[in-house]
Image (cartoon, rainbow, N blue to C red):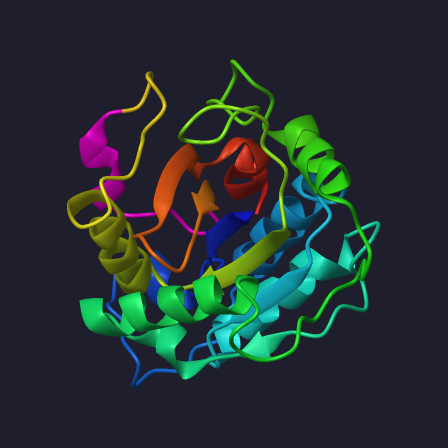
Amino acid sequence: MPRFALTVIRHGETRLNKEKIIQGQGVDAPLSETGFWQAAAAGQFLSNVQFTHAFSSDLTRTKQTIHSILEKSRFCKDMPVKYDSRLRERVKMRGKDFFDFICQLILGKAGQRESCLPAAPGSCLESSLAEVFPVGKHGSLGTNPKGGALGLAASILVVSHGAYMRSLFSYFQSDLRCSLPGVRDKFELSSITPNTGISVFIIECGEAHAPSIQCVCMNLQEHLNGVTEKH
């Protein structure tokens, strides 16, 4: 059964974020100066990670964030981004619908694979993630949820919004019983994701059973050290 890595990132700061104003779907605010710096910092942090697919909400702040991230990539600078309006929804079923679409995509049931590395072996995808999220630091990346070798079929980058991410992570926790790193508290899955906070999951999917999900890291902010203070 195929396994893939899912890296989910919240968009960078906007002026309304800074002023503690809820934006929702009706406000298409661009990134602030700090938001661009945050996105660039996230891109630098992930520059050695080999992604095979990139998805973003169709709102301006997420588009700007994902392009700032990919601009820093050593491998995926010119990767096409798929914009999906489901990624801006806060309704739980919308989040589940997009996640199911991704699983079917990996299973070869929905659409063509968009890849910056068309023939990249799973070991390359795994090793590029392990450089940034090493075993013992942020969680277990070297084994799948049921044990054995990892072997990734894909590595997917998604940039979305805080409300969507909370509903998705809630689905992972309550419905799919997401496996958490030992150092993490289960309530972190329902906490507010900071701007450009990074969460990584290893997912095993199959036709005959629900996906198995292992959380490697949650709301990671290492790349933001010093960014907010400087800008």
Range of residues picked out in magenta: 185-197
Q: From this viewpoint, which residue is outermost toward the bottom?
A: 26
Tell me, yes or no, if residue 12 can be seen here.
yes
Tell me, yes or no, if residue 91 can be seen here.
no
Residue 173 image offset from top left, x and y in percent: 22, 43
Is residue 191 inside the magenta stretch?
yes
Residue 179 to residue 47: above or below: above
Is residue 61 inside the magenta stretch?
no
Q: Is residue 181 left or right of residue 133?
A: left
Which residue is located at x 34 percent, y 82 percent? 27
Q: Main secondary structure of the magenta part?
A: loop
Q: Which one is in front, 217 or 13?
A: 217
Which residue is located at x 50 percent, y 62 percent? 159
Q: Is residue 187 left or right of residue 74?
A: left
Which residue is located at x 51 percent, y 61 percent? 158
Q: Which one is in front, 182 or 66?
A: 182
Residue 188 image offset from top left, x and y in percent: 25, 35
Which residue is located at x 63 percent, y 37 percent? 151
Residue 208 image offset from top left, x and y in percent: 34, 56
Residue 170 image offset from top left, x and y in percent: 21, 50
Residue 141 to residue 90: above or below: above
Q: Which one is in front, 96 or 191?
A: 96
Q: From this viewpoint, which residue is outermost toward the top?
A: 136
Residue 59 to residue 207: above or below: below
Q: How many marks?
A: 0
Residue 102 to residue 171: above or below: below
